[in-house]
Image: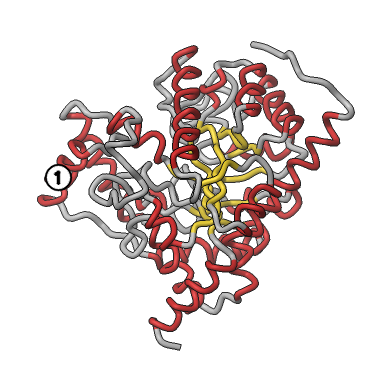
Amino acid sequence: MSAAQRLEEARGLLAEHPVVDGHNDLPWALRNQVRYDLDRRDIGADQSAYLHTDIPRLRAGGVGAQFWSVYVRSDFAGDEAVSATLEQIDAVGQLIDRYPGTLVRALTADDMEAAREGGRIASLMGAEGGHSINNSLATLRALHRLGVRYMTLTHNDTIDWADSATDEPRHGGLTDFGREVVREMNRVGMLVDLSHVAATTMRDAIAVSSAPVIFSHSSARAVCDHPRNVPDDVLELLPVNGGVAMATFVPKFILPAAVEWTAAADENLRAHGFHHLDTSPEAMELHRAFEAGRPRPVATAATVADHLDHMREVAGVDHIGIGGDYDGTAFTPSGLDDVAGYPNLIAELLARGWSRADLAKLTWSNAVRALRDAEAEARALSASRGPSNAHL
């Protein structure tokens, strides 16, 4: 089969089994660039000059469900973090209301299936970082009622009850309150997301959780030794837990040669007064100037496929998925430049001998099943206990 034929087969497969993407930072990009002025960033039309994401490219990429990240930076604290998270949730609601022919709110696995049958993109939300609840289980429950269906326990910074992968550990994983957060997430039906957390936190959370966990955008640490990735011993726990590890496309997490380069590029941003995660046009202009003098190592679809091959081998094909992290990263792999690129990844996996049945699990079925199982566990737990009022 030629490369063109594989790409055509990939598109056909995605028409039937579209991508559930675990993490897209479009809401933060809209906040950062235009303060949610959707007239200035009308994603119903081509926004490739500013964003990785718009509706024409979501359609071209075969996306059938998207977890929109309602992320706020981890230097936001207390009520500021909560308020900003609510603004992010509101932005997702504005997008759904503005494009009802394409986007539809999804709260359950059944909603995801109904969206697919109706030819629309199921829109779910995930909060990225436990700082968004300000140490309050009542706030956690409120976010769930507003439609948030996963929470990443930390972002880049260690918080009062959980250690982050990219900060100094303070707790050896989860504290007792952190374990209670996991139990309460199980009770309400919010998926526990372990991207960004320390390996000790991963292991603690899986030991506590009675529902499937996810990694909304993390790849394999054995392939690229970055603390944001998942160690093999944790991947091996997923078959018993029922969880899903969703491979990310961020070059500094998947390509060893990109780790040092990105650290230097981020430092260049900070030296010019920008936050290192800024992807505004002004920040990207600085990145391009930096790249002109120091060529950037470039990942490809094959780089991501190497991670997925390994994750399938260790965790099994029932426990892997995709979480691109579009609009949350300054750089993307060649061939996976934006949300239109998913067919290129599927074509690469076809070339490696992945079956259609395995690819359907990767793109759609595994993520839907994890949410469905979390819903079932929530029903069982809610019948036996009420809300937790634990506090710090």
Can you name the residue that lies furthest to the right here? Answer: 384
Helix, strand or loop for disc 1: helix
Q: Amino acid at mark 1?
A: Phe
Can you name the residue that lies furthest to the bottom here? Answer: 1
Left or right relative to 74: residue 308: right
Q: Is residue 21 above or below residue 193?
A: below
Coloring applied to the structure = secondary structure
Residue 379, how many percent across, how many down? Answer: 82, 36
Q: Quadrant of residue 177?
A: top right
In the picture, the quarter occupied by the C terminus is top right
Q: Quadrant of residue 179?
A: top right
Q: Is residue 163 above or below residue 22?
A: above
Image point 37% across, 50% down: which residue? 54
Image point 66% across, 43% down: which residue? 213
Q: Is residue 84 above or below residue 371?
A: above
Left or right relative to 385: residue 3: left
Left or right relative to 73: residue 180: right
Residue 142, how many percent across, how many down? Answer: 63, 21
Image point 19% across, 26% down: which residue? 273
State the residue position of label 1. Answer: 290
Image point 67% across, 12% down: which residue? 391
